[in-house]
Image: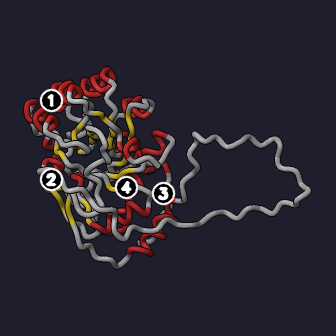
Amino acid sequence: MRARPLRLAFVAVLAGCTGSAGCTGSGGAGPGGERPAPPAGAVSAAAASASTPHRDSAEPPDAGAPPPDPAVEPQPPDPAAEKARIVAELSGRRPRAWGQAIRGVLTHVPATEPTIALTFDACGGPGGDGYDGALIEYLRRERVPATLFVTSKWIAARRAAAELLASESLFEIENHGSAHRPCSVTGRSAYDIRGTRNLSDAIDEIQRGALSIRALTGRSPRFYRPGTAFFDDVCLDAAAGLGQRAAGFAVNGDGGTGFSRAQVKAALVKAKDGSIVLLHMNHPTSGTARGVMDAVPILRARGVKFVRLADAFPK
């Protein structure tokens, strides 16, 4: 497939999500306590930098030029060029692994003290565009930091909520893809949700999600979790080539929104130190919010610290 330049206009025009309501693909049992090894065979980053124009030694620097703002992230590489590079590096590779906790997927954060990373998915699409305002308000009130994985579809459906969340330092907005697809270079499905069809499609899913987040937040995402949290190992390398780490989970906190309040509470209070916990913020009628509200005071009484993924894995 000939690579096409991607533009921010793709944020509003995205492929439909055929998944069932609200990331039910994450309803499988979470992986155990095995900690992943570092990603194997990750794509090396491109070393393309613009050449510096020649300046005569007697020529003074531009006195009127303002200093760079360290808070402003530089423009990312051209998406079409990035896609072409990754296709060239990974084309022809066949996946050897498939799952939610394959080698290279983050399931834990470093923990020298009792620590849990709460992550909440917002999947988008029919039945998945909801917004659990009670849950988010509780996290705000109790100052519980969290990582929010959102799709382009959810951002488009909940623009005002997404903009507010992006403005709050308590929350970190990360990439859940464009159309909530399992990430496969061979079209594999998970939980009856069709995966990306090939390498080109997988890159588009990751890139379009990342572009929508950059348009929302002004920065590129650092972590990627596909719909259903299923990857193959070639997709891991594609995500790494785009500067995003594969984020999975150690604890399935709400069974893809199918758990009761009591089940959510039980899953959280049993979480081991360093666990990344997967929950959802797009189903306000589920047991997620009330289960989280029941569990957080118990965990805090034990001295548990809540962290965002960016806090646990600084640049």
Secondary structure at numbered mark 4: strand
The amino acid pointed to by label 3 is Leu
In the picture, the disc for residue 291 is 1
Looking at the image, is mark 1 or mark 2 earlier in the sequence? 2
| Alpha carbon separation for disc pair 1 and 4 | 29 Å
On screen, residue 176 versus residue 128, left or right, reads: right
Between the C-alphas of marks 3 and 2, the distance is 38 Å
Q: Residues within 10 Å of mark 3 (few under 14, many from 20)?
A: some
Residue 198: x percent and y percent? 31, 69
Nearer the observer: mark 1 or 2; the answer is 2
Of badges 2 and 4, nearer the viewer stands 2
Where is residue 99 drawn, in percent x and y? 20, 61
Q: Earlier in the sequence, mark 3 or mark 2?
A: 3
Quadrant in which residue 139 is drawn: top left
Kind of residue sitting beneath label 2: Gly
Query: What whole-number distance in Å separates the C-alpha atoms at marks 1 and 2?
Result: 21 Å
Q: Determine whether label 1 and label 2 are within 8 Å by CB.
A: no
Check contact, mark 1 vs mark 3: CB within 8 A: no
Determine if residue 273 is in view.
yes
**Regarding mark 2 in the picture, which secondary structure is present there?**
loop
Q: Which residue is identified by label 4?
A: 245
Residue for badge 2: 32
